[in-house]
Image (cartoon, rainbow, N blue to C red):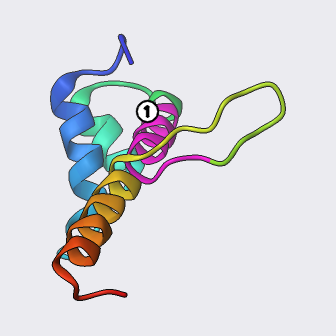
Amino acid sequence: MRTAHSALLYALVRRNYDTGGMRTLPSLADEYGCKVRSVERASARAGGWLRGTRQKKGAEPIYGVEQAAHANAEKLLREAGFIP
């Protein structure tokens, strides 16, 4: 996203994986000086980039970072003979 600050995007990615205190979107909006709706849109796009998306009418699915990591780990385990 061109309009989202890189520190905000980092905070959104961290929000998905940090098991400590869950940051709310309104608190992130206050911290980075933007509207809650902008943070919601950035969060949705970051989530799609991380986890991937399904195919929707008129749009191609996104192959997410987590999907790629799982596929790569499975490939390594299969090649090493741990998974049949």
Left or right, 61 with respect to 32, comes to right
Q: Which residue is mark 1?
A: 42
Q: Residue at x 53, y 32 (%)?
A: 37
Start-end of magenta stretch:
39-53
In which image quadrant can residue 51 be found? bottom left
Residue type (three-letter) at the residue carrying disc 1: Ala
**Relative height, residue 71 to residue 41 (above, below):** below
Whole-percent x and y of residue 16? 32, 60
Using the image as rendered, state which of residue 70 and residue 18 is in the foreground: 70
Left or right, residue 65 beside residue 41: left
69 or 33, nearer to the observer: 69
**In the displayed structure image, the side of residue 42 where residue 82 appears, left or right:** left
Image coords of residue 49 (percent x, y):
42, 40
Q: Residues within 10 Å of mark 1 (few under 14, many from 20)?
A: some
Q: Residue at x 28, y 25 (%)?
A: 33
Q: Which quadrant would the N terminus be assigned to in this image? A: top left
Res 57 quadrant in image: top right
Q: Residue at x 35, y 11 (%)?
A: 2
Q: Label 1's element?
A: helix
Which residue is nearer to you in this view: 72 or 7?
A: 72
Q: Is residue 6 above or below residue 54?
A: above
Q: Nearer the viewer, residue 48 or 54?
A: 54
* Residue 22 x/y as whole percent: 29, 68
> Main SS of the magenta segment?
helix
